[in-house]
Image (spheres, rainbow, N blue to C red):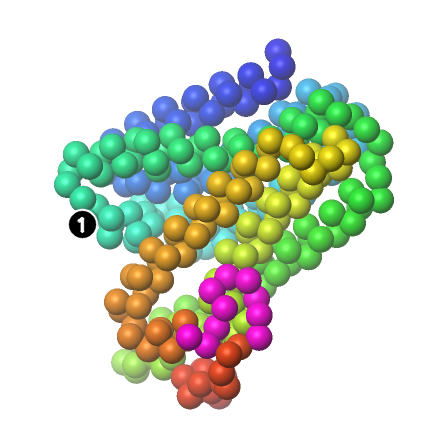
Amino acid sequence: MDPIFVCLWILGGVCALTWILSLITTEHSWVDRIWSIVPVAYVWVFAGSAGLADARLNLMATLVTLWGIRLTFNFARKGGYAPGGEDYRWETLRGRMSTGQFALFNLFFIVIYQNILLLLITLPAWTAYQHRTPLAVLDVLAAVVFLAFLVGETVADQEQWNFQTWKKAEVAAGLTPNPRFVQTGLFRFSRHPNFFFEQAQWWVVFLFGAIAAGSLLQWTVIGAVLLTGLFVGSTIFTESITLSRYPEYADYQRSTSAVVPWFRRAGRGNAERMWSESR
């Protein structure tokens, strides 16, 4: 069987599973829970269909596996796999929609659209499967860039984890955390550096397919494009919630790039200095 059909069978299975589980549990983060797992399976389907004999496909599968391990670990330590570990944004959306509206949103966006997207971002592996050319210097360079982005996302997530751990300790001690959101390290140059590195890795995955085919004009770019679009919408929505909780977030927005790391537009604020001095 052509590997694309195997992936389509997997897609159908995970769509059905995540939808049914959302109905049974009334939690809607099941796609989040398989987000770091299913793409790994898809890429290995293509590598396995080539008999694990194609160096580029093996490299792509290995890199995506590293991506999956890192993301699964970070999601797990935040309690994402525990009962009640639903993303807070779904709860917010439920409060803004009628029961019927959210049921449709759950089926068509959370379940179907996002699962299709998880397949689309891996389809450069299909391009590489169809164009099994020798591994080139460009592949090595792409792998190095991918790993650099992987390290960047790991650092950003650890900085966020360290901050949230400190914040919880402050609250447990009866203190008022100041600042109330992380603004140091990579977050000094981007409000969402983890979002940037996440998207960037999948643009590199697209490049692997383009290198194999010998052209950037590949339709599989749609996966990276749609992923970027999803993150744009997610960033806007997430920041609207953050701003409603922390009015001072507006100052951070004015001084710091939204996603792409860049130089700050203002000097270091008082809240940032207090966090640095309290460590």
Task: State the count of labels.
Answer: 1
Which SS type dominates the magenta stretch?
loop
> Which image quarter holds the N terminus?
top right
Residue 129 vertical position relative to residue 175 in the rendered view, above or below: above
Relative image position of residue 261 (x, y in whole percent): 57, 66
Q: Residue at x 46, y 31 (%)?
A: 116
Q: Does residue 262 belong to the magenta stretch?
A: yes
Q: Position of residue 163 (x, y in %)?
A: 45, 71
* Depth check, front residue: 248 or 66: 248
The answer to if 170 sits in the magenta stretch is: no
Residue drawn 45% across the image and 50% down it: 231
In this rendering, position of residue 116 left or right of residue 244: right
Task: Name the image quarter holding residue 154.
Answer: bottom right
- Please say if 229 is above or below 6: below
Where does label 1 land, which residue?
95
Looking at the rendering, the stretch of residues picked out in magenta corresponds to 254-263
| Neighbourhood count class around disc 1 (C-alpha, 10 Å): few under 14, some 14–19, many 20 upward | few
Q: Is residue 264 left or right of residue 3?
A: left
Is 148 on the left or on the right of 68, as rendered?
right
Residue 54 % position (x, y): 78, 28
| Residue drawn 47% across the image and 25% down it | 11
Task: Give the residue displayed 36% in from the left and 24% down from the top.
Answer: 16
Three-letter amino acid code at the position of disc 1: Gly
Does any portion of residue 40 appear in the rendered image?
A: no
Residue 275 seen in the figure: yes
**Secondary element at tag 1:** helix
Q: Is residue 255 above or below residue 30?
A: below
